[in-house]
Image (tube, rainbow, N blue to C red):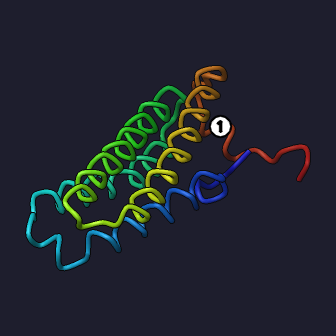
Amino acid sequence: MARKLEELPVYPKAKAFCVAVSAIIARPVFSKNRKLQGQIAEANESILSNMAEGFEQSTDAHLAKYLYTAKGSVAEVVLRLKRAQRTGWVTFEECADCVEMGNEIGRMLGGWIKYLDSCDWKDRGRFQGRESDSD
């Protein structure tokens, strides 16, 4: 069992996605539409923030709630990047790469949520401090 969010396979993928998106929206062309830039930036920031905040929650149900929000934020970023691609601010290849990364992260978060629903621990903190048998 992961003791830190960073130990989970979805975390580095989500982090790489967020870094890539941040680099795209930092381009001067995005200053033409500060609202779109801000919307993408907020949704992008929400991904890792909600994963981290959820990971600190006491129950699986609470964690799942935050993961649903993170998953929704990934979908929002992808949708808004597609809009930016249609206006010519993002290349087709860059958008396709981000869509692919976003889809993979969405599937991983969805799988994690499904797992949490099946476990439904009521006291995650009690299990986070335990040593596993394999340690």
Q: Tell me which residue sits at (17%, 74%) in the image.
A: 29
Q: Secondary structure at mark 1?
A: helix
Foreground pick, 72 / 82: 82
Crowd rating for badge 1 (residues with CA inside 10 Å; few <14, some 14–19, many 20+): few
Instruction: State the residue position of label 1.
Output: 126
The image quadrant of residue 108 is: top right
Foreground pick, 132 / 52: 52
Which residue occupies the extreme bottom position in the image?
28
> Which quadrant: the N terminus?
top right
**Left or right: where does residue 47 sit relative to residue 16?**
left
From this view, report whether residue 15 is shown above or below residue 63.
Answer: below
**Left or right: where does residue 109 sit relative to residue 34?**
right
Rendering coords of residue 57 (x, y %): 48, 39
**Left or right: where does residue 29 sit relative to residue 131?**
left
Rendering coords of residue 31 (x, y %): 11, 73
The image quadrant of residue 27 is: bottom left
Q: Tell me which residue sits at (58%, 22%) in the image.
A: 117
Rendering coords of residue 88 (x, y %): 23, 65
Q: Tell me which residue sits at (35%, 49%) in the image.
A: 78
Q: Tell me which residue sits at (58%, 61%) in the image.
A: 12
Rendering coords of residue 101 (x, y %): 51, 54
Foreground pick, 36 / 50: 36
Kind of residue sitting beneath label 1: Arg
Give the mark count. Answer: 1
